[in-house]
Amino acid sequence: MLAEESDWAEEEKSLDAISPFAVFGLNHSAVGINKHIKSNNVFNIQKGDKVKIKSLTWSPTGQKVQLGFINANNGKQYWTNNYSGGSKTGGTFSLGGPSGSYYIAIRTPSTNTTSINVKGQFEF
């Protein structure tokens, strides 16, 4: 199986209240040039909501990736700038478009020269 994805939710207890958050992963062994993979689940995301990058790795490391949101209703896409170097841990990316129902996605820019193997873990 080339594409593998896992979605799960956990609850974290804080002193004041229980604050739910989602942790999920996106993995694919061969994302082509200018192609994307997206989460199975749709998330209700408000404009400006931040998604935390727990880990993001890809190879070959000379290629680039972008993270983003794909609107589940109209297909409109919102992407970050390119990430390079083969890995990124920590940091966040946020929705620049209107609030709504979105897939979380990883894509390769058209400037890449080969398919990539990518694995990402995200939380919000």
Image (cartoon, grey):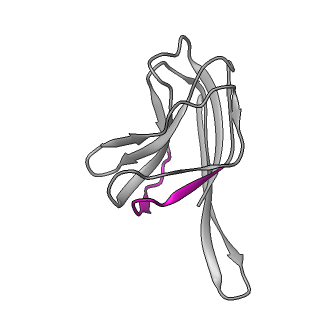
Look at 70% across and 48% down and name the residue there: 90
Q: Is residue 124 left or right of residue 76?
A: right
Residue nearest the observer in this picture, 87 or 2 = 87
Q: Name above or below for residue 59 compared with residue 25.
A: above
Q: Name above or below for residue 8 compared with residue 115.
A: below
| x, y percent for residue 106 | 52, 37
| x, y percent for residue 25 | 63, 47
> Which residue is most to the top?
113
Q: Which residues are magenta?
A: 39-53
Quarter of the figure with residue 89:
top right
> Which residue is most to the left?
74
| x, y percent for residue 117 | 64, 25
How many discs appear?
0
Q: Name above or below for residue 77 compared with residue 41.
A: above
Q: Is residue 71 left or right of residue 85?
A: left
Residue nearest the observer in this picture, 42 or 58 = 58
| x, y percent for residue 47 | 39, 60
Q: Please check the rendered image and state whether residue 100 is part of the magenta-colored stretch, yes or no.
A: no
Q: Please check the rendered image and state whether residue 51 is part of the magenta-colored stretch, yes or no.
A: yes
Q: Quadrant of the N terminus?
A: top right
Q: Is residue 73 left or right of residue 60?
A: left
